Amino acid sequence: MAAFADHTGETYCLRAPYVITVNSDDQIIEDGCVAWDTRTKRITHVCPTAELPNDIRIDEFLEQHVLIPGLINCHTHVAMTLLRGFADDLELMDWLDHYIWPAEKRFLSKEYITLGTQMGVYEMLKTGTTCFLDMYFMPADTVAVTVPAGIRCFNGHAIIDFGDGSVDGLIDVARDYVNNVSTSLVTPVICPHSCYTVPKEKLQKLADAVSSRGDDAPVLTHIHLHESTGEIASYYEKSGESAIETLKSVGLLNRNMIAAHCVHLTEDEISTLATAGVNAAHCPRSNLKLASGMSPVQRLLDAGINVCLGTDSACSNNSLCMLQEMQFASLVGKLSSGSDARSVNCHTALRMATMNGAKALGKDKDLGSLEVGKIADIVAVDLGHIGSLPVYDPVSALVYTNERTVSDVWIDGKRVVKSSQVTDGTLLAVPRLDTAC
């Protein structure tokens, strides 16, 4: 069924063998077009080519591609791309305590943030990510890279109590950053690292700061939650309650929370998260690499929890490619469900990487699907390679094959990747990355 809207500016129109809309009906349009108003940056037409109005000119025909919504990465530490391969094959707490945090203490600087972010953004753009949620230090230096690159960034200052008396200062810095006005490309969020690194009274201080803004100016909270059994047991022994109980008691457990990982959960805890409206950011590759476990994604979905996808950092993954993350989410989801091959199917994995991510970020009216009225964040993926053929189901080819490549990306109607090359000159000094993932 064709979808049109009135428009007043110039129109740019793409045609491809498949348009995967990720709308409420999971509609796939064969030989379809997506057009947008270059003034408003909003999509004006999503329809079969045969139904495109005569006054709309097709500007590009991508002959072996699918068009999909921009991919949304809901858990990253993008500057840590500089630590890719730095400490592999380690358990979570050993990895953090003895390698990652000491390295950050030694090397953290504006230059570290800038170069790591440039590398990470370059990789994300080339693999179809148009929006990401980032938790790290010095967030203003991160967005100094992301804004010229044209990628959407939700980010905040990571809050961790290192036991040196600095945590209150970090909370003040994080609160001041959140008070910055959001733009079309930057949205500040609150980022307490976890319950095991931020004392309960400090989480309460954050919750009070967030609640003081009222419902008219909600602030997203991004946190690590129930990632490994060791972390969960250690926190319970120390505090006498679970991290979920702590977050509920301080008032942070709500629909504005995006909880990364959510690997080990009881049925009661799943029910608690669902009732609170918490969003879960699933990071399957990182959870596998650190041997943290497999999140019960299908059970979370069945309980009504909005599950989105994240890559985590490039030093625990070691990739920022959301195409890979979708594949692993689907494959791991089948095992974690009790070996049910129907669980977390390819269409669900794509929705997790697009529409569910937009919903978690409170942007589902603007992002996450190819529909009239939404912002033109669009990715073209080439399925013409032999390892992706034949194509019976374009979503299956997108998620399960390994030779599909992102060729072109538009964010806010602006082309940021052309013929697999990032267009932002400030990122061109970054070493060339492989186009396939």
Image: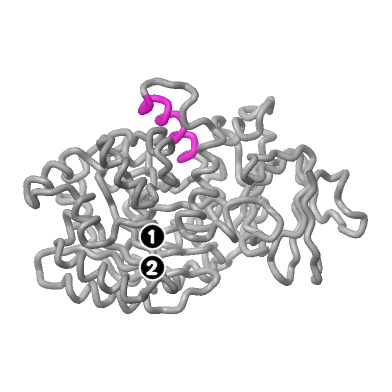
Q: Label 1: which residue? A: 256
Looking at the image, tell me whether mark 1 or mark 2 is earlier in sequence order: 2
Provide residue 203's location: percent of width, then percent of height: 21, 64
**Viewport quadrant of the N terminus:** top right
Q: Is residue 292 among what the camera can see? A: no
Q: Residues within 10 Å of mark 1 (few under 14, many from 20)?
A: many
Q: Magenta residues?
A: 324-337
Which amino acid lies under the numbered mark 2 shown in the image of this protein? Val
Q: Tell whether 111 sits left or right of 65.
A: left
| Residue lying at 25% horizontally and 69% vertically, measured from the top left | 206
Question: Which residue is pictured at 26% across the width and 43% down the height?
Answer: 227
Magenta: main secondary structure: helix
Snapshot quadrant of residue 143: bottom left
* Residue 219 - label: 2
Q: Residue furthest front?
A: 275
Query: Which corner quadrant of the image does residue 41 belong to?
Result: bottom right
Specify whether residue 407 is painted magenta: no
Disc 1 element: loop
